[in-house]
Amino acid sequence: MNLSFTAEQIAAMLGGTVVGDKQCAVNDVSSIEDGREGTLSFLCDEKYVRYLPDTKAGIVLMNRNIEFSGTTDATLILVDNARGAMAQLLQVVSQYLSPKKQGVESPSFIADGVELPADAYVGAFAYIGKNVRLGKGVQIYPQVYIGDNAVIGDNTILYAGVKIYPHCRIGKDCILHSGVVIGADGFGFEPDANGVYQKVPQIGNVIIDDDVEIGANTTVDRAMMGSTRVHRNVKLDNLVQVAHNVEVGESTVMCAQVGVAGSTTIGKHCLLTGQVGVAGHIQIADGCIFGAQSGVANSVLEAGMYQGTPVMPAAKFRRSAVVYKNLYELQTAVRELQKKIKD
């Protein structure tokens, strides 16, 4: 990376306070435990303070509330939130390393009548169907498919291999990573009189609001009727499945391999950690957190932390888990007691 910043410049960008050499310059990043000369690290957790005396990193962003009475060769920049400050700085670096592209690469297909903004980018082998509406600054990477009558908002990025089925709507400032599929048919089948499954047509669409990021190979199915809805600022990790007619509330986060069955409503500011499974036709309240591999079989109507299958309050799950680990010993003790009673 050829981009270089001094501690003084970084502090000015982040509103930080420099402790040490203001002219110390960095041109790369590293973790504090593996810090290298000429790199920037960050420290937002006291358990990593032990690395500070020996780190080779040139500059370390550090939370103001972390106490450090030792010595270090690194220049410190004190900020309120080192992790957030690092993210802010990496945004600047990312824009430098991956500037927006413009123009249309060949070969690609853009249907007649589609208006392409002057600052848009369309990569090779992309397909843009009839009546598609594209916002300003959209970035459509190679091999993207956008079906008829779809809408893509301003500054949205569709990375290579994204598939947007017809009639779906993507908001502004969204990021869809490679392999994402938006609007495939919901899993709808009904057995006939002979028990043969017949397809139920899925005639709805998917609506994704602004500032949504969707990870690689994640799928959001179209509704049977109406819309599957992903609200503003939702973040979906890789390999997440959102079924037909699901509604995901604002600023909710789903980690890898979460699966949500059809017609379920998930509230705002929820967190579903890895491999959580959610049944269909239920409701989840705002502010719910589900531990890894939890199974949500019924509606959860109060905010809180939950875990287990079926889910229960996390504190109760932890107490139950201790008992479960000792279940064999408990069973043995009960059998011995029963034997004594019989004797």
Image: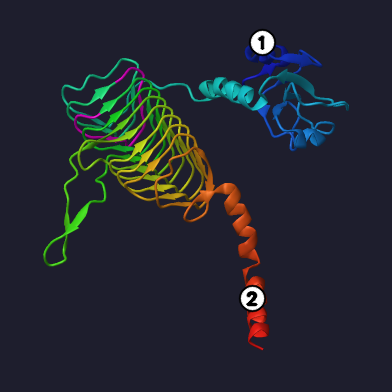
Q: Earlier in the sequence, mark 2 or mark 1?
A: 1
User: What residue is disc 2 on?
Assistant: 334
Front one among 162 and 230: 230
Q: Which mark is residue 58?
A: none
The residue located at (47%, 21%) in the rendering is: 99
- Can you give x and y, in whole percent of width and height, for residue 93 in the image? 57, 22
Give the magenta range.
135-150
Q: Is residue 333 left or right of residue 207?
A: right
Colouring: rainbow
- Can you give x and y, in whole percent of width and height, for residue 229 in the image? 32, 34
- Can you give x and y, in whole percent of width and height, for residue 153 in the image? 32, 22
- Can you give x and y, in whole percent of width and height, for residue 276 in the image? 47, 49
Question: What's the residue type where badge 2 is placed?
Answer: Val
Task: Name the residue furthest left.
Answer: 193
Q: From what the image shows, is residue 318 above or below residue 230?
A: below
The residue located at (60%, 58%) in the rendering is: 320
Question: What's the residue type where badge 1 is placed?
Answer: Ala
When asked about the image quadrant of residue 139, the answer is top left
Q: From what the image shows, is residue 225 above or below residue 19?
A: below
The residue located at (76%, 14%) in the rendering is: 18
Q: Give the secondary structure at mark 1.
A: helix
Please identify, in this view, whether the residue under mark 2 or under mark 1 is nearer the observer: 2
